[in-house]
Image (spheres, helix red, strand yellow):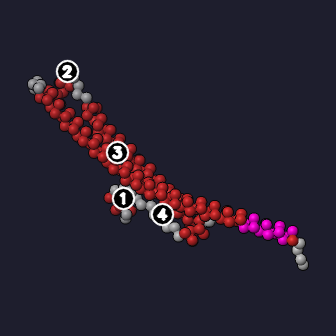
Amino acid sequence: MKFPIQLKIIIALIVVLFVYSFSKMLYVNVTTFYNTEKSYQLNYAQLEQNQITTFDNNFLIFEEKYGIADINKETFVKVTEIIMSSRKDGQNVAWKWMHENQQIDYNEFTKFYTDLSNFTAERYKENNSIERQKQEIAKMHNFLISTFPGIIYNYFFKFEKLQYKEGFISNETKALFGK
């Protein structure tokens, strides 16, 4: 059976369009997969670098705040000793002085330690946020290369799974979880 030339041209055109469409779809999917994988890798590396610089910056601020609190403590104790030593009223002079004269504001003294404590708690929250972002990126990357169609693409690309690495954990946590 012979097909007319017009039918052969239409069939050839349909085949060419189908091949073109399939090739374009495959190219877009592979490119998207590859770029997404690279994006996860780079975002994870950026978070690791950010965590180190953020930790260092926070440590330097902590040291400065601790130094200021320590200086404030020494100054406060000396001023209190000077004020109290000038009184010669005998036993319980501090109690008498507290009721009769200017009060020593202990809130000012403890304010530096409260600020330091609040600062430290906020930095732990900030570090925990970075850790959670690292965990999420590692999870999304590993999901991408382990599920369909990523597993097929990864057969050719051979991307390694992202291994989540804890940033800063205490010695107690290391001992408890064997890290």
Q: Position of residue 68 (x, y in %)?
A: 25, 39
Residue picked out by circle 1? 173
Disc on the earlier residue, 1 or 2: 2
Q: Position of residue 44 (x, y in %)?
A: 46, 57
Between the residue at mark 2 and the residue at mark 4, the CA separation in whole angstroms equals 68 Å
Up/down of 83 relative to 46, above or below:
above
Point out the image quarter for the C terminus.
Answer: bottom left
Q: Secondary structure at mark 3?
A: helix
Give the image quarter of residue 79. Answer: top left
Between the residue at mark 1 and the residue at mark 4, the CA separation in whole angstroms equals 22 Å
Give the image quarter of residue 154. Answer: bottom right
Q: Position of residue 158 (x, y in %)?
A: 53, 70
Residue depicted at 36% across the width and 56% down the height: 169
Disc on the earlier residue, 1 or 4: 4
Dot 2: within a 10 Å radius of its alpha carbon, few (fewer than 14), some, or many (20 or more) residues? few
Dot 4: within a 10 Å radius of its alpha carbon, few (fewer than 14), some, or many (20 or more) residues? some
Between the residue at mark 3 and the residue at mark 1, the CA separation in whole angstroms equals 19 Å
Q: Do the residues under discs 3 and 4 have CB atoms within 8 angstroms?
A: no
Q: Is residue 26 visible?
A: yes
Point out the image quarter for the N terminus.
Answer: bottom right
